[in-house]
Amino acid sequence: MSQHPQIDQAVMQERRAYYDKIGTRKMTPLWEVLHALVIPQPKSACMPAIWHYADIRDDIMEAGRLITAKEAERRVLILENPGMPGQSRITTSLYAGLQLILPGEVAPAHRHTQSALRFIVEGDGAYTAVDGEKTIMHEGDFVITPSWTWHDHGNDSDRPMVWMDGLDIPLIQALDCSFMERLPEDSQPLSRPTGDALARYGSGLLPVDFEVKTPTSPVFNYPYCRTREALETMRRAEEWDPCHGLKLQYINPATGQSAMPTIGTFMQLLPKGFNGASYRSSDATVFSVVEGKGYTLVGEGETQQRFDWGKRDTFVIPSWVSHSHHAPDTDAVLFSYSDRPVQKALGLWRESRGNR
Ligand code: GTQ
């Protein structure tokens, strides 16, 4: 408490008048906001949240009765972080949505500066065409649409397909560099056979004269069967990380960097009985459950939450929030993505284990 409340009142009044005056000249005092701007550690509007697929699948299918993929252009339910309603984002920097394509539908060709990933949640056999090549998608596949590449989606199978879209929309918004255009035709012309990119760039080989021209991986479908086999073979070494189980990152084979420049993507195996140690990192992370079930403890003390999850559920952990993964009854496989490559490129990324 102040010893001179009268004087403080007078000073406060004078300051307020001063703030009003400089406000007319488009200025404002830093000292009133400094400690909200430069804070000791992340304090995000992003909240931990979970979407159970069993609770939302009917809503997704209902969208399929209300609007066609063509009319919607992209028929997607945005997974909106409850801490940032109306902002079309799941973390401060990243977007997530669940996209539905019904048999026979086409989501027409367009391109934009935002990079996109597709992570296949339900169904088999729909396709995405990227830069003249179609890839047929299966559950657990990780598919990339690099910045400014033409892409259209279609479903020639006889079942609905649902995938998670992960895009860097909020990041591009912050940088004000969104550009987009549409192709006059629904589907782009194809110039290469299906599987060409994976054979050419994803077999531990590269064309002899290959030159890196863009930061995004030339492999645009990382099939789950290969990822799963890698995890299954590696588990024999019994080298479990106390926090992550066995965790791999998807890389661009031409550079060794993350597969996408703005979004880091990961797949991890938690063996049955896994009791993970507490972990936090500065990249808020979106998880999609590929196999098995388990739970994640989020936060600490009285505010700690428990997210029970199973196949096809999505959950998000904000920046610098401690969490631990547990898989008491089954093996579990988790796909995840975050803005880690951006933070690393800028020398900002941090992690800590065991509440240190
Ligand atoms: O498939 O191109 O969920 O442009 C949001 C924006 C998907 C897409 C989204 C998009 C797309």
Image (cartoon, rainbow, N blue to C red):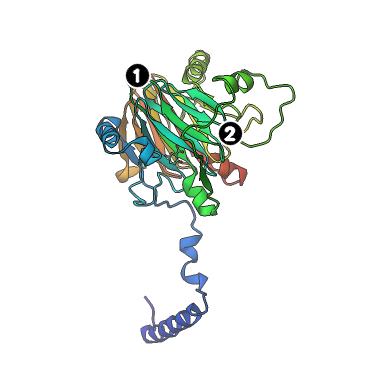
Residue 268: x percent and y percent?
A: 46, 25
Q: Amino acid at mark 1?
A: Thr
Q: Dot 1: what SS?
A: loop
Q: Residues within 10 Å of mark 1 (few under 14, many from 20)?
A: some
Task: Judge whether 244 appears above or below 46 on screen.
Answer: above
| Image quarter in which the N terminus is found | bottom left
- Asked whether residue 278 appears in the rendered view, the answer is no
| Foreground tag (2 vs 1) | 2
Mark 2 to mark 1: distance in Å?
A: 29 Å
Task: Judge whether 25 appears above or below 137 on screen.
Answer: below
Examine the image and state in which quarter residue 204 appears: top right
Quarter of the displayed picture in which ligand 1 can be seen: top left
Residue 28: x percent and y percent?
A: 50, 74
Query: For the point 32% across and 26% down, which residue is it?
Result: 310
190 relative position to 317: left or right:
right
Residue 350: x percent and y percent?
A: 54, 43
Query: What number of labels is visible?
Result: 2
Q: Nearer the viewer, residue 159 or 220?
A: 159
Task: Judge whether 144 appears above or below 238 on screen.
Answer: below
Per the rendering, the mark at residue 184 is: none
Outermost residue toward the right?
A: 209
Examine the image and state in which quarter residue 212 appears: top right
Q: Nearer the viewer, residue 345 or 72?
A: 72
Q: Is mark 2 within 8 Å of ligand 1?
A: no
Counting residues from the N terminus, which is met first, the one under dot 2 or under dot 1? 2
Per the rendering, the mark at residue 258 is: 2
Q: Amino acid at mark 2?
A: Ser
Per the rendering, the mark at residue 330 is: 1
